[in-house]
């Protein structure tokens, strides 16, 4: 809209660019179901369109390929084996179809996502029912990733080769309370410990940085907290994350061990029985002082953004979101990684199949 609109670089949405307008952000196909009372499977692929200059790159990306092995018919205890979401945070586990903001916050997008591993989950039966009620009432929840989650996984990210002989450890504890008036409130903590080998290559200045780390890579440690007052009709959602990992230094010559922190706060309101559908107005503030660990050369990323939005669910399977995004962040494609400030108006049409 205005500001430094010719110098922007928004790594999560390539349509936010002086030379782009439209983008198919996600095109996902799923196959899932119960094989028996003790085994469920899921496969998900994503046909991604990535604009680059005057051309586009198209490829089929594997998102999920896992099996849930249950220990009992009530499905209170199970192990998920394969490539799946790492049980960390609330927003990371929330489906993009449920998330109000168009993108995940930088602090969470820059760490874990999907990976290959084995994860143990436990959810007692009455908590299963609460998660199902949250979903049935369209309260923008996450799926059931257990009250307790523990796991081991590769740590290099989905569809990436292992770069060391160590594994990552993850643990998460969350609990959805339900008050006498029917209000749901969820809070939890989570942590990750491991070593990570970042990818390096030519940077914007034309040379490849070195790694100031042992052969097994940098420490990759995260601790986070989350709290969600579900929108009934008013809601609040917040997370904060503290981490340690690699970041490109100021001279862009070396990747060094450093500490990060950041998070977001989101307020939302649910308007049922609108003239046609359901409305979710929301406002989100986010802060991050860290690095994009999953990007090449782990460039530094400093963010102070404010986003105002409105999601309109015309039908359960069709929704339109408009977001006014006031960006104040690092240009990660620039040779000097300078900051830019600009206001961006974004629209998204989403349709889902069931």
Image (tube, rainbow, N blue to C red):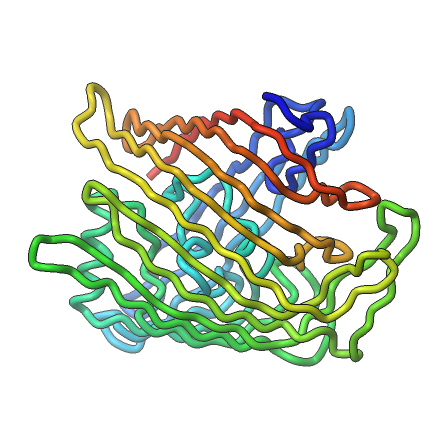
Image coordinates for residue 338, horizontal then vertical, percent: 75, 42
Foreground: 137 or 159? Answer: 137
Q: Please give the name of the residue rendered at 38% of the width and 54% of the height, measured from the top-left corner.
A: 238
Where, quadrant-wise, is the N terminus in this rendering?
top right
Foreground: 185 or 14? Answer: 185
Q: How many marks?
A: 0
Query: Is 102 situated left or right of 142 in this image?
Result: right
Tell me where residue 124 sits by quadrant: bottom left
Residue sitting at the far left: 180
Foreground: 72 or 317? Answer: 317
Residue sitting at the far right: 207
Query: Is 145 situated left or right of 60 in this image?
Result: left
Tell me where residue 350 sits by quadrant: top left
Query: Is 103 situated left or right of 206 in this image?
Result: left
Where, quadrant-wise, is the C terminus in this rendering?
top left
Foreground: 63 or 322? Answer: 322
Q: Looking at the picture, does residue 91 appear above or below residue 254?
A: above
Q: Looking at the picture, does residue 101 appear above or below residue 93?
A: above
Q: Please give the name of the residue rendered at 56% of the width and 27% of the height, measured from the top-left corner.
A: 344
Q: Looking at the picture, does residue 148 appear above or below residue 269?
A: below
């Amino acid at each position: 809209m205005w500001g430094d609109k010719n110098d922007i670089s928004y790594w999560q949405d390539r349509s936010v660019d002086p030379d782009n307008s439209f983008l198919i952000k996600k095109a996902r196909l799923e196959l899932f179901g119960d094989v028996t009372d003790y085994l469920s499977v899921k496969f998900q692929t994503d046909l991604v369109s990535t604009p680059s200059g005057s051309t586009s790159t198209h490829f089929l990306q594997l998102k999920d390929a896992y099996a849930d092995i249950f220990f009992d018919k009530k499905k209170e205890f199970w192990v998920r084996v394969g490539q799946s979401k790492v049980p960390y945070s609330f927003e990371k586990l929330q489906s993009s179809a449920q998330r109000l903001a168009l993108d995940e916050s930088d602090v969470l997008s820059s760490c874990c996502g999907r990976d290959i591993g084995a994860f143990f989950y436990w959810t007692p039966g009455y908590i299963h029912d609460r998660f199902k009620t949250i979903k049935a009432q369209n309260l923008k929840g996450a799926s059931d990733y257990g009250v307790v989650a523990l796991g081991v996984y590769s740590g290099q990210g989905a569809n990436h080769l292992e770069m060391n002989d160590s594994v990552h450890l993850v643990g998460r504890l969350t609990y959805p309370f339900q008050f006498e008036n029917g209000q749901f409130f969820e809070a939890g903590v989570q942590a990750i410990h491991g070593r990570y080998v970042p990818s390096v290559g030519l940077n914007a200045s034309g040379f490849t940085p070195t790694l100031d780390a042992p052969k097994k890579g940098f420490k990759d440690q995260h601790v986070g907290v989350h709290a969600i007052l579900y929108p009934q009709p008013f809601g609040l959602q917040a997370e904060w994350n503290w981490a340690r990992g690699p970041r490109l230094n100021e001279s862009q010559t070396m990747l060094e061990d450093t500490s990060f922190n950041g998070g977001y706060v989101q307020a939302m309101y649910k308007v049922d029985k609108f003239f046609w559908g359901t409305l979710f107005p929301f406002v989100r503030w986010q802060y991050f002082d860290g690095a994009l660990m999953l990007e090449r050369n782990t460039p530094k990323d400093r963010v102070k953004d404010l986003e105002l939005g409105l999601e309109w669910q015309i039908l359960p399977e069709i929704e339109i979101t408009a977001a006014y995004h006031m960006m104040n962040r690092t240009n990660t494609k620039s040779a000097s990684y300078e900051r830019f400030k600009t206001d961006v108006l974004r629209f998204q049409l989403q349709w889902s199949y069931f």
